[in-house]
Amino acid sequence: MPLWHHPGEDRNKRQTVANLEKIRKAIGRNVSDADIWKAVSVKDILPRTAQFLWRSIHNAHRIGKYWTHIPKCGDRATCQECEVLEDLDNILTSCKSPGQGIIWEAAKSLWLEKEDIWPTVSLGTIVGCGLAEFRDDKSRTKPGTQRLYRILISESAYQIWLIRNNRVISRDGAPASKEEIINKWKFAVNQRLQVDKSLANRPIWGKHPALAQKLVLETWSGTLDNENSLPANWLREPRVLVGSRVFPQTQTRRRLRHGIG
């Protein structure tokens, strides 16, 4: 055994294998490891979020068991709110501290503006969101629905992670308010919408947009504020947002004042 070998490496490798199996079970398909790793970095998922998902599969975050082997840091291993050994499953899907529950409820509400059924959220579906498939009643792929799901799940999970870190590291365990949590999530989702609009309006080499306009329209249709008053192609409209039916109107006005849209 090499001198630099650490027992934690073997444990992380076992956890990586277990996480890959969780993804396969969650999505209900027998996909290869290579397909899973490729799906983490699909273009619908932003690089910073893709890195978070990649580290999640590798069990590479400094949480839970990581701290149990470091002298005088054992207390960091426990979720102070839930009083359990902290792991990513707890952080993303079951922690009692304000964060994950509020964000998933917001994501569900927005999703149900477009689709009829909110898929089950689990660690496997979160880190495997790039493999999600949605089809119509004729078994045809629904690219816009598929893309919205990847955006909502990946961005929501990443915001939960950031809110948890802020609470544990910067706020000494003090939770954020529901309003603050909702504002951060909504801001992140609307940023994705604005980026999509930008890319759909920006030509590459003067010919084609960086992102297909049809795909952007299909992705966000059904979720937009005051959608009935928008033109069929709203990509050049300056004030396109999501969230008025999910959040109080005061939140929308606040974000408008800060330049979103």
Image (cartoon, grey):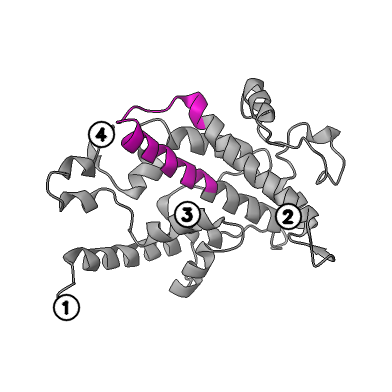
Residue 174 within the magenta-colored segment of the rendering: yes
Residue bearing the label numbered 4: 80
Residue bearing the label numbered 2: 199
Please name the residue shown 87% across and 40% down the image: 231
Looking at the image, tell me whether mark 4 or mark 1 is earlier in sequence order: 1
Residue bearing the label numbered 1: 2
17 relative to 163, above or below: below
Quadrant for the N terminus, please. bottom left
Query: Mark 1 Cα within 10 Å, few/some/many (few <14, many 20+)?
Result: few
The Cα atoms of the two marked residues, 2 and 1, are separated by 49 Å
Q: Is residue 133 left or right of residue 54?
A: right
Q: Which mark is residue 125?
A: 3
Looking at the image, tell me whether mark 3 or mark 4 is earlier in sequence order: 4
For the magenta stretch, what is the residue range?
A: 155-181
Please name the residue shown 85% across and 33% down the image: 229
Residue type at mark 3 is Thr
